[in-house]
Amino acid sequence: MPKQQIKQILALQDFEMPVEVSGWVRNRRGSKNVAFVHLNDGSCQKNIQIVVDAAHIQEDLIKKISIGACIKVSGTLVASQGSEQDREILATRLIILGESDPEKYPLQAKAHSMEFLRENAHLRTRTATFGAIFRVRHALGFAVHQYFNEQGFYYWQSPIITASDAEGAGETFRVTTLDLNKLPKTDDNRIDYKEDFFGREANLTVSGQLEAELGALGLGLVYTFGPTFRAENSNTSRHLSEFWMIEPEMAFYEAKDNQDLAENFLRYLIKYALDNCKDDLGFLDQRFAKEEQQKKKEEQSEMGLLEKLRFVVENDFERLTYTEAIDILLDSKPHKKKKFKYPVAWGIDLQSEHERFLVEKHFKKPVILSDYPKEIKAFYMKQNDDGKTVRAMDVLFPGIGEIIGGSQREENLEKLKQKTDELGLTEELWWYLDTRRFGTAPHSGFGLGFERLVQFVTGLSNIRDVIPFPRAPLSADF
Ligand code: ATP
Ligand code: MN
């Protein structure tokens, strides 16, 4: 018999047929003669009920069906008399694939705290919540590839090990094979990286952008989807040390095209999840509602999770410049009543409290901010004619803050080289500058933090709960 997933059995139209499933016991009720088992194999949110009775199955086997155990069942799919399900499997054959001591199994049939589940990340995928999160994560990842394929983009791999620290400003993880206890030294007593594996300093990438630009300036439309690493010591609910980033880079796209793509892309991804993850999002919607009830009235979200997702799909994002945003902030109640922790003035790097005010209080929808002061943005962003701002854009989401950061790139060799000269990067980035030296072209791109997207769609408040094995300062278990 071909292997059947519980998802498939739950979709069958005809009953009274033989079926076979394997899965983990979520719960069992009943006596030593008959057990009602809730079985889940990860294929979907719902469990299937298995009825195991002593008329068909040996009693000592029935005894071993405990929470956490893994079993394989053959039997007949029948209509259920219970009110909670329309069908169940009447077991005629049962194999205990893996016993589990119910006294010691960490996951009980009750709600556990997210902290506890993080400490048990090796088992948390067997819970209803994490099953839902990781299935939604999968769907969103699949939709990323589908979207770009439909739009004529090519999937491009930027290197994970790089020798440039162009953006990281020291927030990189070093890659080395040197013996840290016996470091080779140069004559002036510095570490001699010529002796290292690559013959030079190397680190894990903080962004695949610079190499994605090389892809775009030949293939036209490319995107990366890979891991990035940042050694920033920010222990927030929105930062990981290892996270996945999607970075499209497009030749012949200017700032507005970049904004249009970012908005269209995000709405497509969220719609894909709404259309394809109904059960999981329905479950997460209820979970979200319960979590919100625990919060103070003024901190509660005005919309439910599904409502929020539909709202983003159906409404245009608000677009305005950084300068306009500063004016709104200067004119805002929290600024006038000195409620913001950080000061507001033209030139500041917006703090999360400012971004959240704009998105959650003022506009009540996603916001695209553009044309930031050049001093607070990266060297490769295209300079505006005003001499003060660059063609940057950040997409800000409710509850998340920045979900996308991007820009039109500087294509003018002189202007770009002036910047790399200032930063002492001209020599190191000769290959990057070459693309402006030979056949330069206007182009744009952005980076979407995949976990922040998954956070938004699943309604999870901590980013560590939307990646299977989170990496954060002082935390690299599993
Ligand atoms: P933030 O100000 O929130 O730290 P950033 O300005 O450092 O973000 P970018 O360098 O523009 O972000 O990176 C692009 C996107 O990658 C961000 O918009 C965000 O979605 C995501 N991102 C950045 N840093 C992290 C991180 N440490 N963990 C998870 N996602 C991140
Ligand atoms: Mn950052």
Image (tube, rainbow, N blue to C red):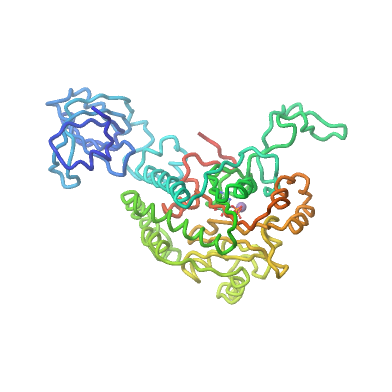
Residue at the spot x=64%, y=47% of the render?
214
The image position of residue 89, as x and y in percent, is: 18, 35
Displayed quadrant of residue 414: bottom right
Q: Is residue 231 above or below residue 200?
A: below
Left or right of 168? Residue 2 is: left
Which residue is nearer to you in this view: 280 or 426? Answer: 426
Q: Quadrant of the N terminus?
A: top left
Which residue is nearer to you in this view: 469 or 165? Answer: 165
The image position of residue 175, as x and y in percent, is: 67, 35
Q: Is residue 38 above or below residue 139?
A: above
The image position of residue 113, as x and y in percent, is: 41, 46
The image position of residue 223, as x and y in percent, is: 54, 48
Displayed quadrant of residue 73: top left
Q: In this view, does 247 lie above or below 18?
A: below
Left or right of 426? Residue 240 is: left
Residue at the spot x=27%, y=36% of the render?
39
Residue at the spot x=82%, y=30% of the render?
185
Q: How many marks?
A: 0
Q: Is residue 430 above or below residue 93?
A: below
Which residue, as the protein is rendered here, is positioned at the far front? 439
Left or right of 403? Residue 310 is: left
